[in-house]
Image (cartoon, rainbow, N blue to C red):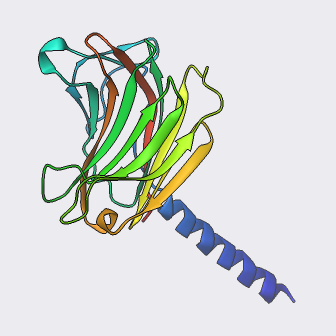
Amino acid sequence: MKQPRLTLLCATALFLSHEIQAQEVLLFQDGKSEPLHEKLKFHHGSWKFADGAMLGEQVPTEKHTATIKGLIPFDRLKVEWKMKFAQPKENFLFVAWPADSGAHAIDFTFNPDAGKFAIIRPKFNDLPRAILSEGQLSKLDTEWHELACVHDGPNVTVTIDGVSITAADESFSRPMGPFYLNGGGFDGAQFLVKDLRVTSLK
C-alpha cells in the first residue's frame, strides 16, 4: 500500500525539480549598491547608486534616454524590475535586439503619466511597424511601478502594476540579442531602477 505513495512523492519531486530548472534566475540586481552585475551595463546617461536604486540621468550631449543594457539574449526569458521617474511626463521604452543585427526586434512603450502601454512589432522584412496590443492602468499615482516582460517564442507578455497584455507575432520567434531599459525623454530626466531580475523559461 505504500508503493503508490512513494511513486507519487517521486513524481512530485521530479515535477518540482523541473519547475526549479524552468525558473532559473540568471541575474539579480537589487540596485542598492555596487558592484553592478557583470551581465548589466550602464549604456546611456549618467548613472549612480542612490536612493536605494540605480539612478540614471539623461545627458544632453548623448541625445538619448538613460539606458541599462542587459547582456543576456532576450530569448525565452522573464525580466522583472521596479522603476520610478523623478519627473512627470517621462516615457519608458523596452527594446530587444535580434541576434543578427542592430535593428529593434521587440519593443514595448510605457507612458506613466497617462498609464498607457503597448507591445510593438518594429518593421521586419516586409512587415510594417505595428502596435500589437495596448494596455491602460487605472491607478496613475503609483510611485514605484512593478513590471515584467516575458518572451516565449512568438509570444510576448507585458505586466505593469498587475495589468497584463499579450501579443504574438512571427518576428518574435527569431533568435534574440540583448535587451535595454530606456527611461527619460528630456535633458536631465531621472530614471530609477531596482530589483532587476532575469529568469530563464528553459
Residue 187 seen in render:
yes
Residue 30 seen in render:
no
Q: Residue at x 44, y 41 (%)?
A: 197
Tell me the quarter of the picture where residue 59 sits.
top left
| Pick the front one: 149 or 115 | 115
**Residue 145 vs residue 55: left or right?**
right
- Residue 108 place in picture, x, y as percent: 39, 44
Image: 16 above or below 71:
below
Q: Residue at x 50, y 47 (%)?
A: 134
Image: 87 above or below 146:
above
Tell me the quarter of the picture where residue 181 sits.
top left
Q: Report how many numbered discs are placed on residues in the image.
A: 0
| Pick the front one: 3 or 170 | 170
| Residue that protrudes farthest toward the right in the picture | 1
Q: Residue at x 29, y 31 (%)?
A: 68
Q: Residue at x 22, y 20 (%)?
A: 45
**Residue 186 vs residue 146: left or right?**
left
Q: Quadrant of the C terminus?
A: bottom left
**Residue 92 vs residue 62: left or right?**
right
- Residue 166 place in picture, x, y as percent: 51, 56
Tell me the quarter of the picture where residue 156 sits.
bottom left
Image: 81 above or below 8:
above
| Pick the front one: 167 or 73 | 167
Q: Quadrant of the N terminus?
A: bottom right
- Residue 33 place in picture, x, y as percent: 38, 19
- Residue 89 place in picture, x, y as percent: 43, 18
